[in-house]
Amino acid sequence: MKKELVIGIDAGTESVRVGIYDLYGKPVGFGVTGYQTYYPHSGWAEQDPNEWWSALVNSMKKAMNQSGATKDEIIGLSLDTTCATIVPCKNDGTPLRRALLWMDIRSHEEAEFISSTRHKALKYNGYGKVSPEWMVCKALWLKRNEPNNYQNAEKLMDFSDWYTYKLTGRYTGSISTTTYRWHYNQEEGGVPKHFYESIGLGDIFEKLPQDICKLGEHVGGLTKDTAEELGLKPGTPVAQGGVDALNGILGLGITEPGKLALLTGSSHNLYTLTNKPIHAKEILGAFPDAVVPGLNLVEAGQSSTGSTIKWFRTNFCKDLDIVANNKNLSVYDILNQEAINIPAGSEGLIVLDYWQGNRTPHVDPNVRGLVSGLSLKHGRAHIYRAIIEGISYGTDYNIRNFRNNGIDVNEVYAAGGATNSKLFLQVHADVSNISINVPEDNQVACLGSAILASVVGGAYKNIQEAAANMVRFKKERIEPNKENHEKYQLYAEQYRKAYPQFHSWMWENTKINQAQSIGIQKEILV
């Protein structure tokens, strides 16, 4: 009997990963290839789509070789990518310039202008500031600053659109990317034309995809040339994919309300699904049909979480490298062993996790990290634990904000590098008094794309059935410690009080630092 396998493609910020799975979610082959990010100026970030493609070809060959699969055994494939990563290109997909990566914030002036319009479409931004990461800001920057590229662009493709076109020869838009970062709403007529026109993008509509497909929808089959290049069979079904983080939600098995996806890494991304469209201050969304048809997605996040822990390890723990190597452990293992013996609350330390500003609920890029309560009694383990607790207080703040707006969250499903730390998970569970589930396969975006591939391949009738059969969780669930939860309540409350009390002072301090930095740069130039 012939095996039936599916392929999930996950193109992140640094690399493209290809996972091959059986129909029960078991990984049988994996390949990863990196690509370069270019930083022409401060705040700019670009990538070459041609490098995306060569990396995909290489990763696909690695995965197929490792799996031992034949091309006849592949019944479908799908993909996810970063978003909004914008590619101005010709009708045949030829890029006119390097892509503006999702993290590119050169369009900050355009973002401020768009935010000032207070248009009703900004309900998706929590009725607040639009991030320069979003598509409309990048498109307006192109029009203002590179008018030739903007005018000559027959298509403005998001990364996932470009990959889909290369695979199938069909130009589509994903309901995932368009609702998530393009202000698109299918039930309200699609792209809000009045909004686009009011900000000077009235001529953009012919450049945007007209066919918006839902996740898992059959886009087409692999073209002959593409199949040959990838080592796959021509005509292999391709399912519409979308945003990497959102496919990761499927890889966590979340297809219904009440469950919170916590995707950890350099930052925290928090997502949950709702039956009703909820638009509120300090919450992003709701994004209709972005993951599961008929459901809405709401989002929150913390700008610097894993990156702050890495900062601490890099700058204050260099002496532990030799110790860790001798014990065949990581530096984080040693730090966790030391911090686990520190009482909940780190004996009075409170950390504001604002190293890169605050994403939600305050949407404030001008605040910075803060450690309060230091005494001569405190040591390195105290500060390390306090950073984890501060991150957990920030996560809890967002969970409370969800609940205060009628969004029910009962348990957490977490993935990413931070889930390798039991201390990190336990503190999160204790602070929020909530259970945390961790999947067996931490490559949740790859698995999410494979789930979509299983639907287009006919193995399952819909996303829900596929996820129920393909996602597995570790037996050990992290349960909250009630005693620690009680101890954390006062500290979490102090954390929430800190922003209104200190944000003006932090703004002033940030401006002083920026002014002095500019002065130093001018002196260097002179």
Image (tube, grey):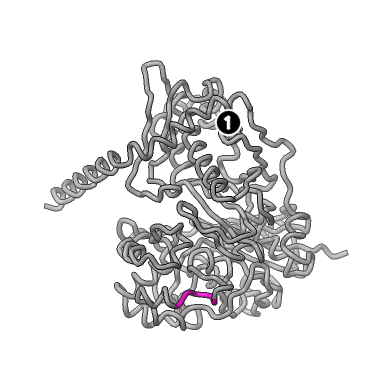
Q: Amino acid at mark 1?
A: Leu
In depth, the one of 174 and 185 nearer the eye is 185
Instruction: Give me the residue at 38% from left, 24% from top.
Output: 373
Residue 25 image offset from top left, x and y in percent: 74, 54
Dot 1 alpha-carbon crowd within 10 angstroms: few under 14, some 14 to 19, many 20 or more: some
In depth, the one of 328 and 259 nearer the eye is 259
Instruction: Give me the residue at 58% from left, 75% from top.
Output: 212
In depth, the one of 143 and 148 nearer the eye is 143
Residue 37 image offset from top left, x and y in percent: 42, 59
Residue 317 within the magenta-colored segment of the rendering: no
- Taking the image as shown, residue 126 lies to the left or right of residue 411, namely left
| Image quadrant containing the N terminus | bottom right
- Taking the image as shown, residue 400 lies to the left or right of residue 232, namely left
Q: Quadrant of residue 464?
A: bottom right
Give above or below for 261 relative to 173.
above
Count numbered badges in the picture. 1
Dot 1: what SS? Answer: helix
Residue 325 visible at all: no
Give above or below for 23 relative to 208.
above
Residue 214 image offset from top left, x and y in percent: 63, 70
Q: Residue furthest left?
A: 526
- Taking the image as shown, residue 82 lies to the left or right of residue 64, namely left
Q: Residue furthest right?
A: 1
Residue 138 visible at all: yes
Instruction: Give me the residue at 44% from left, 61% from top.
Output: 102
Type of secondary structure dominating the magenta stretch: loop
Residue 209 image offset from top left, x and y in percent: 52, 78
Residue holding disc 1: 423
Magenta residues span 189-193
